[in-house]
Image (cartoon, grey):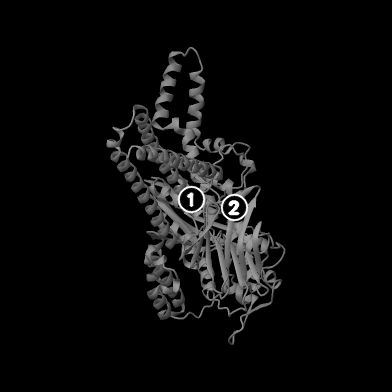
Amino acid sequence: MNILSCSDLSKSFKDKVLFDSISFGLNQGDKVGIIGKNGAGKSTLLKIISGIETADSGSVVVNNNTKLMYLDQNSEFDSFDSALEFVMKGNEEINNLIDEHHKYSHKPNLTEKESARFSEINHTLDSLNGWNHELEAKKYLGMLGITDYEVIVHTLSGGQKKRVALAYVLMSRPDLLLLDEPTNHLDADTIQWLQDYLQSMPISLIFVTHDRYFLDAVSESILEINDRKIFTYDGNYEKYLEQKEIFARTQSSTLEHNLSKLRNELAWLQKGAKARRTKQKSRIDWIDELKKSSIKSKDKKIKIELGKTFLGNTIIEAHYIAKSIAGKKLFSNFTYMAKPKDRIGIIGPNGCGKSTLLNLLAGKIQTDDGSFELGASAKVGYFKQEIDDLKDDQTVINSLREIAEFIDVGVGRDRYITAKELLERFLFPPFQHFAYISTLSGGERRRLALLRMFMANPNVILLDEPTNDFDIETLNAIETYFDDFYGVLIIVSHDRAFIDRMVEFVWVFRPDGTIKEYPGNYSYYLEQKEKEESLRRQLASQNQVKTDTRIKDTVKVRKKLSYKEQREFDMLEEEISSLEIELDDHQRMMTNHDGKDYKQIETLSSKIEELQKLIDQKTERWMELSESIG
């Protein structure tokens, strides 16, 4: 059944045409990803469908019985409700029914009509599972990392508000859901949960995302906005790449660079998780062969080659560093000595201290303990989540020239990369060079801020959520840039595809405040994590078997004990068995904990320690009784 029809939509901003006479439709249950360059009009199209903005011409028709919900990329809203109260308001129908039920349940004498209505309300709440309304809201908040249900929404950060807003729209149980960059401000585990949830839900979905894993997993078709038109591709992102490759084969030789780029992207994606778990990208032999055999592009938009920047013996040296904020320990006893060409990804739940660690490594804040030294030759480029150094009344090219006129790569005939060349290579066409920054989209502003950092030619680069607001083509450009970067690269990112491509080691924040290093990329880390958890489960099972065997072996001994001793012996066996089961449960809870609720982590740790002591004490007494009657 068709639930959405968009016909001949056109939209312009000032002199820029975003799209012209585009048409498409959506059937019930369809899941569609929208892709296109920054500024192509992806977010605007979602706003037009939702009714927030109007098209210059054309029509949007949503089925009358379709409940539509839209989540903005920035989610700028305010509320003095608690997070729980706010999210529960997401389902207006259940809220109204509960209010009505409350009114009738407190009325002493109901009329016949009121009794019938009260019965109808109960039946409807049963059918909607409305009695679990509060539990459902808590589930969404908890899975999205908001564990303090009573926190006032007004006091939350922008990222936290985005997660509360996401919980709100999920709570509403929409028929058609529009999501603009839903993975922004989510950690990797939460993204995986959202991905699985959207895959399993029988809803219609239109979404914009730069997360290629998320796009590939959730989408069933792709809408691409390109050159003011819209193109439809059946299948997910991988199928889209295959179809684009076939299309590129039919084009003239001037488009061969597109074929090469798509072939590389498709080869990487098709290789799957197994190949992405390799310790170094250079070891993916057949992808390297593809790169060598591909036709060299005459278009230098994407390729940026940098020479080796001098790095002394000391780059970054951190020995047993630690940091706490407002009495909360983020990390401790962490040691790192940087080497040229280090490629490191940092992983952990929101609020665990990833950005704080970057600030410390950049020399912006001091360590609470241990020692930290930034080498004299280290030139740090730090790309933060919030962009605050752009001037709206400055032109794009002058913003770069404010940093430097050119980058000296130190090699070859084309030794110098000018500001103009860098802009063109990073997808800013010539007509945009003299545009004012105030006219740029959010993604274009972030791309310009990144180029300002590149223009300073740093040899140590720290990136904090660099993929937010970037289109896929920009991400490919960034990844290509770093293929030839000689310095140190350390990344905090929720984008699993980006981390997989970019890093050779992963630092993982653990609930106890330690940081553990894993060789390989993100997918390889997930494989190792699953092996560790499997081993823990196996050991816990073996310990339970040993306990059961020990109890069985003492049956004969019990017969030789006095009544009082036998009673104590019996109680000890039962208590030890019960305590070990409880210990196993708490250890499993700690293993599976997402690290978001530090108070709960402390409680679990204390309980585990207490249980272990009790087990040791009671086991020692059990052994005394057993040996005394030998």
| Left or right, residue 253 beside residue 440 | left
Residue found at x 38% / y 40% = 623
The front one of 40 and 355 is: 355
The front one of 201 and 508 is: 508
Q: Position of residue 312 (x, y in %)?
A: 63, 77
Helix, strand or loop status at disc 1: helix
Q: Nearer the viewer, mark 1 or mark 2?
A: 2
| Left or right, residue 587 beside residue 338 | left
Numbered circle sitting on residue 190: 1
Which amino acid is tagged 1? Thr
Task: Identify whether 18 is placed above or below 147.
Answer: below
Instruction: State which quarter of the image contains the N terminus.
Output: top left
| Left or right, residue 101 beside residue 552 | right
Q: Position of residue 139 (x, y in %)?
A: 47, 40
Task: Identify whether 432 is placed above or below 585.
Answer: below
Helix, strand or loop status at disc 2: strand
Instruction: State which quarter of the image contains the C terminus.
Output: top left
Q: Position of residue 40 (x, y in %)?
A: 54, 61
Residue found at x 41% / y 76% = 288
Inter-mark Cα distance, 1 to 2? 20 Å
Numbered circle sitting on residue 330: 2
